[in-house]
Amino acid sequence: MTNRLTSYQNAAPKVTLEYADGRQLLLDVYTNEIIRVFMNRGRATNSYAIEGDKHHKTSYTVEDKGDHIEIRTPSLIVKAYDNCKVDFYDGDGNPLVMDYRGQREPLPNDLDEEHQSTVLAEGHDINLLDKTNDRYYEVIKSLSPDEQFYGLGDKPGFLNKRGYDYDNWNVDFGQVHNESVKGIYKSIPVMYGLKNGHPYGLFFDNTYKSHFDLGKESENYYYYSATDGNVDYYVLGGHSLKDVVANYTYLTGVTPLPQKWVLGYQQSRWGYSTSDDRVAKIADGFEKYHLPIDVIHLDIDYMRGYRDFTWDTTKFRNPKQFVAEMRKRGIRLMPILDAGVKQDKDGYDIYQEGIEKGYFVENPDGTVFVGRVWPGDAVFPDFGRPEVRNWWAKHVKFFADMGACGVWNDMDEPASFDGELPTDLIFHDGEQKTTHTRMHNVFGHLQAQAAYEGMKAATGKRPYIITRAAYAGTQKYSTIWTGDNQSIWSHLQLAIPQLNSLGMSGFAIAGTDIGGFQKDTTPELLTRWLEASLFVPLFRNHAEMGTRYQEPWSFDRQTLNIYRDYLNLRYRFVPYLYDQLRHETESGLPVMRPLVLNYDQDPAVRQINDEYMVGTSILVAPIVNQGADKRLVYLPAGKWLDFWNNAEYSGQQTIMVNAPLEKLPLFIKKDTILPWGNKVKHISDEPEKVMTFRLFGDCGAYKHYQDNGLDFKYQEGEYNEYYVEVANDGQVAVKLNKHGYQPTYERVYVETDRGRFEFDYDDSNEDYRLVK
């Protein structure tokens, strides 16, 4: 039966489509390249991903074409038909997102009714068409033979998600992560498509449990389904895949600039925090073996009985003094913070205060829900309420007062040892009561927001927050890591597509546990993992208590020496990574990128899982297979130079590269200038006095950014911009294009094949002169 499109109302920027059955479909024109599709199903309309009004005044036309209503912006064409069907095209008329006109069909299988209940009872994953409840809905789109899918945050598996299905429901997943797993710690419901080479994005802003099937069930369609919520999604256009990603981060926010030292090396282990002596000995090891380091992480043992916002003074005799002593040694300490608050009626202030103010999640009967995590019986803050976030943020000052460098949020899916929290628990969505089903996927997001705001208020510096659980937009508050991986080669292989997917999903600062968190690593696996992570923004080695030690000196001399070499190399690249993060705050594009993001019209890069790029000028091709000492490397368009020997290669070809254990295959785009950091043991808070730039090729130009690396004064213009150029004729120039940050480099070196050119800063004209 046809549900006719009877009329429309145009009240810019919104076009409301009205149907015979009384339903209304809203098309909201945010920008030339972003249109929201919304159907109210009686649920809350506030967004946890998008802050503020993101509308740009946009010229568009609406026209009744007889069999459909057509909306045109300069970049998108929308055609709305009967039965609430809506098709999206780019400005040239190329199909992007097309509603499917058929019905879903299950994957063929031999499961009969007699065995279905048995199979489900045993926990097997099977494909059914059953709706989960009366609030369930689906959005089904047509699938082209040449259509690839990317994004979706931390979902395990390959870069190209076509042919797989995934859940959006944050889960504390302690088993092996692989492509058969439908979801782990984060729910980032943004997907990107290349349809016959034409890019688009879809962002479904719904916090309820949802599901993506990206061509697994059928070669004719892909679909999104949700257990509840409004139909609420954004179609993202753009001339390139980079434009589409930038439109998503425009909506949900960019990753803010971190303190510069966050890019340094970080060492962690569940077990270091059993005593201050243990932590000091780790610091001693880095000093003894001449290994650079900036942060040591403290897992749950530093707390008093796993109570949040406490520090055990039997393990750490004077915690504040110890943190200060470590800071004098150039090392910051990063403590963990769990989501569950210990149920303790004997004077534990956090619990008592939260109970008195009614700040914890409740059972349907109004009693406080009690789960079980590390401290035993525990209660959970109702972070959906602004006053609860403010309360939590004020207590975060505890870490600032101790001198800790940030807050590492864990177990914030939220996790419980007794299994998932009941779905009918009473949470708040702002001032309105709701259930766990609405707030589950944003619990970690809101805890991260509270920690960010608390540290910012307490210190005035750029907060360093890490979270395991996240939702779309969490990148505004927190860095992330991929959770409890394992010391197995498949998890090293997974790291590259997973981090690339997270980068495309807004998280410019992310990392994996180098070497693997669970199980026992090997010297070869640890070495290759470190090499593969050379440019990963969050550069942390982390391991579980009871596993093999993963400190660099815990292995043979070869492993230690290679580890040291790559730590030193990482610090050389820190200025470049910092420049890239500054660029990310302006462009919305990630630092670590899949090749397809830079070369979306090259079919050869659409399935590459074991290479990545850093910005647009560096290509990394790690060894991710045990025993391998050579590999094939695909080089995209352009000329490329081998970082190690300057050998030149033409792009759009696959080459064989030798890669003994000590070598990471690494290529620089020809005619690139890169900043080359000083060799240091720690990243100092003091401004650097000397900077070097290296030319790879014959000529090039580079813009370099400098600020104090700590606070928010750069947002008021307190930063410097340098311009370095080597012209075709070999002439070298260094210019200070913007001088907003008082300290400048006293000396700048530019290294080329023709020699090393030295420039000194001239105070009189605020520029650099070549030293003859």
Image (cartoon, helix red, strand yellow):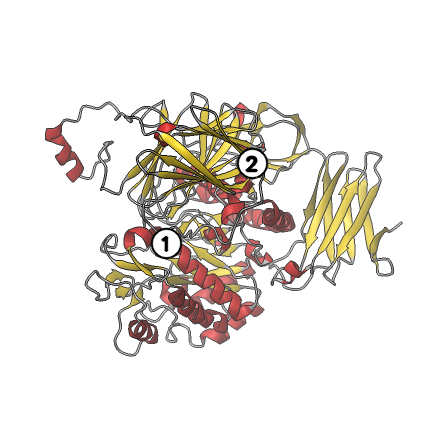
List the residue tagged with mark 2: 60
In the current view of this chain or complex, which residue is farthest to the left? 114
- Image check: 223 left or right of 78? left
Name which residue type carries label 1: Glu
Distance in Å between CA atoms under marks 2 and 1: 56 Å
In the current view of this chain or complex, which residue is farthest to the right? 772
Q: Earlier in the sequence, mark 2 or mark 1?
A: 2
| Image spot of residue 220 (x, y percent) | 36, 22
Q: Is residue 533 visible?
A: no
Is residue 97 placed above or below 373 in the rendered structure? above
Image point (33%, 33%), residue name: 20
Image point (45%, 72%), residue name: 398
Image point (77%, 36%), residue name: 699
Nearest the eye: 547 or 268: 268
Nearest the eye: 312 or 434: 434
| Image spot of residue 741 (x, y percent) | 72, 61
Element on which disc 1 rests: loop
Depth-wise, is mark 2 or mark 1 nearer the camera?
Answer: 2
| Image spot of residue 510 (x, y percent) | 49, 48
> Could you say which disc has been placed on residue 544 in the image?
1
- Image check: 274 left or right of 750? left
Name which residue type carries label 2: Tyr
Q: Quadrant of the N terminus?
A: top left
Nearest the eye: 740 or 62: 62
Mark 2 residue crowding within 10 angstroms, few (<14) / some (14–19) / many (20+): some
Image point (57%, 43%), residue name: 589
Element on which disc 2 rests: loop
Q: Residue 365 falls in which quadrant of the image?
A: bottom left
